[in-house]
Amino acid sequence: MTGDTPPPPLRTPSRPRFSLRGLMVACFYAAFALAAVLHPSTLAANFLQATMVCLLVAASVSAVLGRGTRRSFCIGFATFGFAYLALAWLSREGSPTLMATSRLVYRLLPGNLSLQDQPAFFASCTAIETAAYATLGGATAWLVAVVLRRVPRSRPVSRR
């Protein structure tokens, strides 16, 4: 039994770490998104959509250049985000009305909203849905990466 080394200890999963700056940006985006839904405007909808596309591009760059679990989060974020964005905006009508979640958005539609503000309302909701699905994809990819790191790898048995 001399010369046998014990298997390496299993690593405990690291908890995700959030910087104060990142939390402040997330709070600002959430507050602005809620304001854009309550008082829809074309400017607010365009800002939310542009911000979401910038986040997806930044996640794609970070997925290429990053390392570790941050990289896996960015891969999931970018994949799910771009997939939802493509499904939402590349439908036959050119709008996200065919998405399953759009039926939920119709229930959120304020009754006193004018027909002129409805496209901005739906565009804001689409940006919020894209952010939610991208975050869900990032969290799923991060969790899979953490679990796969914990799985012990079998070592080949050497024959003597």
Image (cartoon, grey):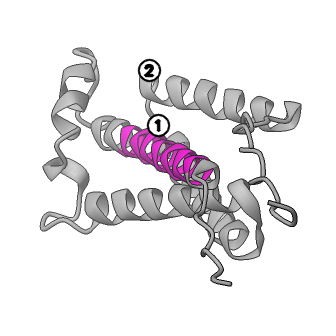
Front residue of 141 and 107 = 141
Q: Is residue 156 above or below residue 19?
A: below
Asked if marks 2 and 1 touch (Cβ < 8 Å), the reply is no
The part of the image, by quadrant, that contains residue 154 is bottom right
Q: Position of residue 112 (x, y in %)?
A: 26, 15
In the image shown, does 140 or 134 lie closer to the viewer?
140
Residue at far top of view = 111
What's the amino acid at mark 1?
Ser
Q: Position of residue 24 (x, y in %)?
A: 79, 30
With 96 as the anchor, is 127 left or right in this view?
right
Q: Which residue is mark 1?
A: 41
Quarter the N terminus occupies: bottom right
Q: Residues within 10 Å of mark 1 (few under 14, many from 20)?
A: many
Span colored in magenta: 123-147
In percent of the image, x 60 and y 75: which residue is there?
Answer: 156
The residue type indicated by label 2 comes to Leu
Residue found at x 63% / y 69%? 155
Asked if residue 32 is positioned above or below residue 142 in the image, the reply reads: above
Q: Which residue ends up furthest to the bottom in the rendered image? A: 160
Q: Considering the numbered disc 2 on the image, is that residue within a helix, a strand or a loop?
A: helix
Q: The residue tagged with tag 1: helix, strand or loop? A: loop
